[in-house]
């Protein structure tokens, strides 16, 4: 497995790979890999000729009071896991190279970046869209792989890629969960044992909503009221939002017709967790 940390070298390698008529699959990550990330790598391995995993903790998507400094990092561990998953290239650039002194350009996707998570994280998705756009320009993938757990991010990246005619196929794969249902996340490491147990309120709330929808309930206000009540019954949980929206454009829905995205953001202690599910009515 090749390790690259220079942007020019990664661009050069991408050109070489394409000249051979081979396809590139990119899995963008911030590192501290878990099975959710590895599932994306395995799918990229199945679908493409060359798998590139970027490991870059992106400073411009963190707010001033967020956890950039303490975000978990272990590059040697990540390299080992990526190699076991059949990755060909690890791209691990430095922040000073990704954002040099006179860097000014920001990618914005209006209408999708001022709701759900971004209501409490202003500028977050501008940072996400900007870094992913840069990674696409550097790695030049044919396919890019993202997890459904970050549903809003996936919608924004799809819109950006289509609007800017990037010619990249965006693949969004299912959430990978622990045995008890907790969605895998690099931030789960922050949770104490007591908080880890409390965090199951997210999964339990999603399952309750699924049950209500399958029983024929279509009124989103009723479902979100039930979801909010369940989460608020957990003393260690602080609900940020529970919203039901269109899975394509994230517009809020009053009634469920076909499919709807239920998205949650909850703080367990000081750790912010997100999760979601697709609701289907009979």
Image: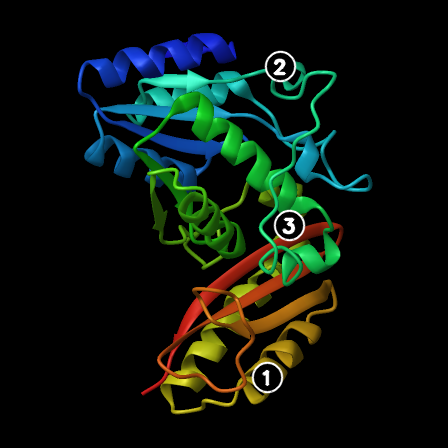
Asked whether residue 81 is in view, the answer is no
Q: Quadrant of the C terminus?
A: bottom left
Quadrant location of the N terminus? top left
Q: Residue furthest right?
A: 65
Q: Is residue 268 above or below residue 209?
A: above
Q: Which label was assigned to residue 97?
A: 2
Gap between marks 1 and 3 measured at Cα: 26 Å
Asked if residue 139 is positioned above or below residue 190 in the image, the reply reads above
Q: In which quadrant of the rendered view does residue 72 lie? A: top right
Nearer-N-terminus badge (2/3)? 2
- The correct choice, above or below, for 163 with respect to 71 in the image is below
- Relative to 43, is 199 on the left or the right? right
Residue 256 location in percent, x, y? Answer: 44, 83
Q: Residue at x 67, y 15 (%)?
A: 96
Report the residue marked by disc 3: 193
Residue 161 appears in which quarter of the rendering? top left
Residue 238 or 258: which is nearer the viewer? 258
Marks 2 & 1, CB-CB < 8 Å contact: no
Which residue in the protein does label 1 denote?
Answer: 226
Choose mark 2 or mark 3, whichever is in front.
2
Report crowding for label 3: few under 14, some 14 to 19, many 20 or more residues within 10 A (C-alpha). Answer: few
Q: Residue 193, position in %: x, y?
A: 64, 50
Q: Is residue 180 left or right of residue 30?
A: left
Q: Quadrant of residue 226?
A: bottom right
Mark in the foreground, 1 or 3: 1
Relative height, residue 221 to residue 176 (above, below):
below
Mark nearer the N terminus (1 vs 3) = 3
Judge left or right: residue 32 versus residue 176. right
């Amino acid at each position: 497995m090749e390790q690259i940390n220079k942007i020019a070298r990664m661009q050069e390698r991408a050109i070489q790979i394409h000249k051979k008529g081979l396809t590139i699959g990119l899995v963008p990550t911030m590192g501290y890999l878990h099975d959710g990330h590895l599932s994306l790598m395995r799918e990229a391995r199945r679908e493409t000729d060359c798998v590139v995993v970027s490991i870059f903790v992106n400073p411009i998507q963190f707010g001033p009071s967020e956890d950039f400094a303490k975000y978990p990092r272990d590059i040697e561990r990540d390299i080992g896991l990526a190699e076991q998953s059949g990755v060909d290239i690890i791209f691990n650039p430095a922040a000073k190279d990704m954002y040099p002194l006179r860097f000014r350009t920001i990618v914005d996707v209006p209408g999708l970046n001022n709701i759900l998570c971004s209501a409490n994280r202003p500028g977050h998705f501008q940072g996400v869209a900007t870094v992913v756009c840069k990674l696409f320009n550097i790695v030049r993938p044919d396919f890019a792989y993202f997890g459904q757990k970050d549903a809003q991010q996936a919608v924004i990246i799809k819109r950006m890629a289509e609007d800017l005619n990037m010619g990249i196929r965006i693949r969004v794969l299912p959430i990978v969960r622990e045995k008890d249902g907790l969605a895998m996340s690099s931030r789960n490491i922050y949770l104490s044992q007591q908080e880890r147990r409390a965090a199951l309120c997210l999964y339990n709330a999603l399952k309750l909503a699924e049950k209500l929808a399958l029983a024929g309930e279509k009124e989103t206000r009723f479902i979100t009221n039930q979801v909010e009540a369940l989460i608020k019954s957990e003393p260690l949980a602080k609900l940020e939002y529970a919203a039901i929206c269109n899975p394509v454009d994230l517009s809020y829905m009053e009634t469920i017709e076909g499919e709807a995205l239920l998205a949650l953001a909850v703080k367990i202690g000081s750790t912010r967790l997100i999760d979601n599910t697709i609701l289907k009515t009979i």
